[in-house]
């Protein structure tokens, strides 16, 4: 059997034999669906209080995906732990002694972990869409409405890409604790704060989660200078940078 | 067969491993000796391609480690007993390793049986004692049925039974014709297991020689004498120009004088002796003798020009 196939099988076995994998992925699913549905129900109840302009710009699909703001934190935890599990114990040395071609090791790990995140991300996105629309009642939209399917796929893809981004960052930092300590507050607080500070707002649009949000919207946010396609490109650039950075660190440093 | 040629490792300005050249042969246990911080672990990590060499070359069966196709089938290594995922069962930890090198999964059960962990195969190593962790690490090293087995400080933290087990295992592996390379800072342990020694201090090669030769070369033979007439013996030795150290009443230690000559002297001067015995220096004494006077070498088998060994504190072995 060729080395990449063996590496993929090994990494799949690693992913599926630790408890953190089902826990973090389930948390990402549950938190996104529960909060998305709650916010949808709240929006439904408060809809009449919205201004005429807000009513016109109301994004039924986008509203059901807002749970992702919290759910993404579990996806970040998943991505960090996939990598951090190797570094916490020094297991990375066993892994690299078994797979000395570090590129094969790294990209195999990323491939299987990304695959699992993609499945969970998509399931989460569709479930939260339908649950959210049910909660929105008369203000809901349908999956076959214009751009809705694209936004649903975008929301699922966004969660997946956040996991991949975290894997790259964790590989660069080589520590779960450090990665969590940086990524969690950053995406939970810092980007939200930056996005509401007038001066920093323009730059904040180009942060990964803000770009990702554009992917999950049907109605384009008029403040943001790009649409869903632009959001995807920005997000992919962030992910590519993190993954490449992780690869260079892993390749260059002593284990 | 492992060959090192001019292997050097620098961290910034600090030279941790300095121009090491030696090879490790199959069929015997080669002990890798040196005080803590001498560069043993770094050298072993470089052999496994984990740490990059600053210069020099390491070949495993004629190839660099990274070029080996299924490396676990060539080299099995125990570097750190804790290097297992604590949340994944012992069995699954080994299964993940086996899959990466396409090793049949039946080997996982075999090695767990071999190291005596079969009954806790489904338990997570988080709750393992140090000794059990060490056994799991050794199981991982044996997984690919490798020709080369490399163990870094394998007896650390083991109970006497565990130490005995590792010792027997290493001897058996060597008897099967494998290359066994084991590092330790415990000379007494090495003396019981190793056939051949590679000694380093401050990253430099101090000796690469057989165990017996090493002790003979690096220790001065001495003779122990016990007598009920210490005053008389003292005078006799002094008159013959022999310096003796006295350890307690009536017990003398004489270096560099053959037993025969001492016996003849005693007979000649009619000194009653209760004991006249040649002493074999231990490996530990030989080691201290070597590293203590590392600057002056007596034979060609020892590398020249190394500095005296002082344990380094800035880099911990891990």
Image (cartoon, coloured by chain):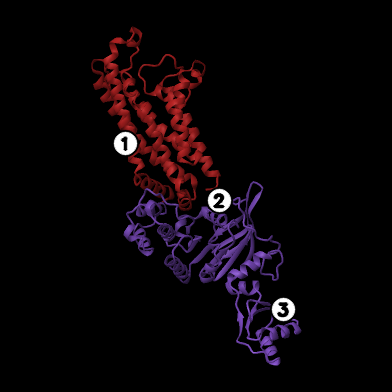
Chain colours: A red, B purple
Q: Is residue A147 left or right of residue A7?
A: left
Question: Disc 1 vs disc 3: which is toward the camera?
Answer: 3
Mark yes or no: residue A35 visible: yes
Image spot of residue B89 (x, y percent): 35, 52
Q: Which residue, given by chain and number where applicable, does mark 1 sit on?
A: A26
Residue at the far top in the pictured view: A52
Q: Splitting the image into 4 quarters, where does residue B135 fall?
A: bottom left
Q: Residues within 10 Å of mark 3 (few under 14, many from 20)?
A: some
On screen, A189 above or below B71? Answer: above
On screen, A26 above or below B90? Answer: above
Image spot of residue A249 (x, y percent): 53, 41
Q: Secondary structure at mark 1?
A: helix
Q: Chain of mark 2?
A: B
On screen, A20 above or below A31? Answer: below
Question: Disc 2 vs disc 3: which is toward the camera?
Answer: 3
Q: Secondary structure at mark 3?
A: loop
On screen, A205 above or below B40? Answer: above
Q: Chain of mark 1?
A: A
Q: Splitting the image into 4 quarters, where does residue A159 fall?
A: top left
Q: Which residue, given by chain and number where applicable, does mark 2 sit on?
A: B51
Q: Which residue, given by chain and number where applicable, does mark 3 sit on?
A: B243
Q: Splitting the image into 4 quarters, where does residue B238 fall?
A: bottom right
């Amino acid at each position: 059997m060729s080395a990449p196939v063996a590496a993929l099988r090994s990494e799949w076995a690693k992913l599926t034999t630790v408890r953190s994998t089902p826990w973090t992925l389930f948390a990402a699913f549950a938190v996104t669906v529960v909060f998305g549905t709650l916010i949808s129900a709240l929006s439904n109840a408060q809809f009449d209080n919205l201004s005429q302009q807000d009513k016109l710009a109301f994004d039924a699909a986008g509203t059901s995906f807002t749970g992702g703001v919290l759910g993404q934190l579990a996806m970040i935890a998943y991505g960090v732990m996939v990598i951090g599990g190797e570094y916490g114990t020094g297991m990375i040395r066993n892994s690299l002694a078994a797979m000395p071609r570090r590129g094969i090791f790294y990209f195999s790990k990323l491939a299987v972990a990304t695959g699992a995140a993609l499945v969970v991300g998509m399931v989460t996105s569709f479930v939260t869409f339908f649950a959210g629309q049910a909660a929105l009642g008369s203000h809901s939209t349908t999956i076959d409405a214009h751009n809705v399917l694209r936004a649903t796929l975008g929301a699922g893809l966004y969660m997946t890409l956040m996991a991949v981004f975290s894997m790259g960052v964790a590989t660069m930092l080589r520590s779960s604790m450090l990665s969590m300590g940086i990524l969690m507050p950053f995406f939970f607080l810092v980007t939200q704060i930056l996005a509401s500070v007038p001066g920093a707002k323009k730059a904040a649009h180009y942060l990964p989660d803000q770009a990702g949000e554009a992917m999950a919207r049907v109605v384009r946010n008029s403040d943001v200078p790009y649409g869903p396609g632009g959001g995807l490109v920005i997000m992919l650039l962030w992910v590519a940078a993190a993954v490449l950075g992780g690869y260079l660190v892993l390749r260059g440093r002593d284990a | 067969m492992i060959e090192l040629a001019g292997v050097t490792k620098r961290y910034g300005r600090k030279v941790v491993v300095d121009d090491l050249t030696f090879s490790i042969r199959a069929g015997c246990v080669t002990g890798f000796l040196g005080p803590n911080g001498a560069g043993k672990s770094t050298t072993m990590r470089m052999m496994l391609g984990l740490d990059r060499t600053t210069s020099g070359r390491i070949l495993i069966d004629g190839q660099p480690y990274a070029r080996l196709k299924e490396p676990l089938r060539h080299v099995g290594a125990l570097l750190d007993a804790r290097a297992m995922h604590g949340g994944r069962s012992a069995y699954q930890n080994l299964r993940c390793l086996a899959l990466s090198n396409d090793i049949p999964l039946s080997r996982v059960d075999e090695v767990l049986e071999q190291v005596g962990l079969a009954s806790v195969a489904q338990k997570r190593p988080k709750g393992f004692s140090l000794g059990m962790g060490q056994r799991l690490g050794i199981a991982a090293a044996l997984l690919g049925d490798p020709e080369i087995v490399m163990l870094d400080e394998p007896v650390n933290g083991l109970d006497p039974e565990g130490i005995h087990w590792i010792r027997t295992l290493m001897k058996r592996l060597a008897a099967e014709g494998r290359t066994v390379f084991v590092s330790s800072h415990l000379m007494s342990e090495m003396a019981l297991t190793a056939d051949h020694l590679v000694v380093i201090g401050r990253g430099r090669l101090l000796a690469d020689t057989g165990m017996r030769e090493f002790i003979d070369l690096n220790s001065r033979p001495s003779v122990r004498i016990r007598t009920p007439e210490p005053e008389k013996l003292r005078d006799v030795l002094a008159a013959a120009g022999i310096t003796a150290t006295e350890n307690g009443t009536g017990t003398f230690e004489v270096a560099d004088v053959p037993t025969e000559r001492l016996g003849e002297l005693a007979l000649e001067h009619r000194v009653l002796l209760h004991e006249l015995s040649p002493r074999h220096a231990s490996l530990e004494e030989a080691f201290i003798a070597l590293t203590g006077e590392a600057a002056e070498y007596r034979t060609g088998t020892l590398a020249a020009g190394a500095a005296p060994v002082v344990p380094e504190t800035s880099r911990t072995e891990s």
